[in-house]
Image: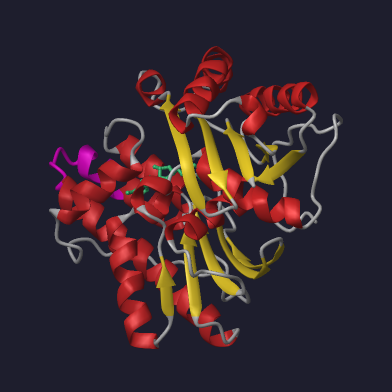
Amino acid sequence: MKILAIETSCDETSAAIIENGRKITSLLVATQVEEHRLYGGVVPEIASRRHCESICQIVDMCLKKANLNFYDIDAIAVTFSPGLIGALLVGVNYAKGLSLALKKPLIPVHHLRSHIASNYLTHPDLKPPFLSLIISGGHSHIVLVKDYCEFKVIGRTKDDAVGEAYDKVARALGFPYPGGIQVDKASVKGNPSSYNLPRPSVEGSPFDFSFSGLKTAVLNILNSTKQKGDKINEYDLCASFQLAVCDLISSRVVFAARDLNQNKIVVAGGVSANSGIRKRLMQDAKDNNFKLYLPDISLCGDNAAMVASQAYYEFKNGNIADMSLNAIASLAIDYI
Ligand code: KG4
Ligand code: ZN
């Protein structure tokens, strides 16, 4: 079964064709990063406009790359939630139009479910059940994936998402957008024990995260150093921040895996590209005897290949939409 998927939830316009949920036939990602960098972050209105301008071309190029035409496609999939509402609407309306014109099924895909599916493309042997750590710009979750379309949220952030904390620290340091990767690169050159940063926990919720206190501690160090007229060692501060993030993530994941008796851990979301987190979780897997699945670096960020992969399982599960499908800015992963 060939699924053509569309992803426009944030600042990447992407189209992909995937065979039976696992084989990438064609994938194109057009990023808007350069333009948003001028403003230090994603400007929702600009994002929607650029999606409108490029969606038709991206889909045409995707088909051409696969040497296919619209009539070779068996179903159309689209990210419908969560994300920037104006950006999502472009993909949803384009996909609805295509589905109506071609008389092919329309499959709605939840963005976080699709991030998990980036691992089905990377690891052909991977099948639920497993425990998933989702770390992105907007979400930080520990989720029990009981089946391809059955999820139970075990833990979540009570404030900032981990990617958001990275981006805010990067912005305060004057790094260009998107900042997460810049902090990651700087941290490799620093000493992680230079700054004493907190590891906040959520009382009574051992699987939940809190990153805002850690982020504020970094911002306070920056401000007080500036006030004293001293120069900050950016590498050391980034390394100390990254170590604190790794400690927070690692402790919750290991505890959740043990408590729920899960020996497969699947990492997903844009922050899964982080070198420190990858290394730490690999060590945790060795020490605790669980199998770790990390998405290929090329599939960590937003892309339509992961959407088509999840769509295959949504379709098999009967999750098909009609022309009343709408974009939804915020929706839990276990919505059905
Ligand atoms: O999943 P994603 O592409 O978009 C959302 O669904 O949010 O994640 C984007 C987030 C941004 O916050 C970005 O700074 C962060 O992932 N990110 C990283 C790294 N690469 C991307 N954060 C830390 N280290 C990285 N190497
Ligand atoms: Zn994402």
Q: Nearer the viewer, residue 145 or 274?
A: 145
Q: Quadrant of the C terminus?
A: bottom right
Coordinates of residue 19 in the picture (x, y in percent): 56, 47
Say which residue appears at 42% left-offset and 27% top-offset: 31
Give the residues in magenta. 221-233
Q: Nearer the viewer, residue 165 or 116?
A: 116
Coordinates of residue 74 in the picture (x, y in percent): 69, 39
| 61 sits to left or right of 186 | right
Residue 111 among those drawn in magenta: no
Visible residue check, residue 73? yes
Q: For ligand 1, give the image quadrant.
A: top left
| 158 sits to left or right of 273 | right
Q: Quadrant of residue 102?
A: top right
Coordinates of residue 165 in the picture (x, y in percent): 43, 48
Residue 230 among those drawn in magenta: yes
Say which residue appears at 26% left-offset and 42% top-offset: 182
Q: Is residue 8 above or below residue 162?
A: above
Say which residue appears at 49% left-offset and 28% top-offset: 62
Say which residue appears at 27% left-offset and 50% top-offset: 184
Q: Nearer the viewer, residue 130 or 173?
A: 130
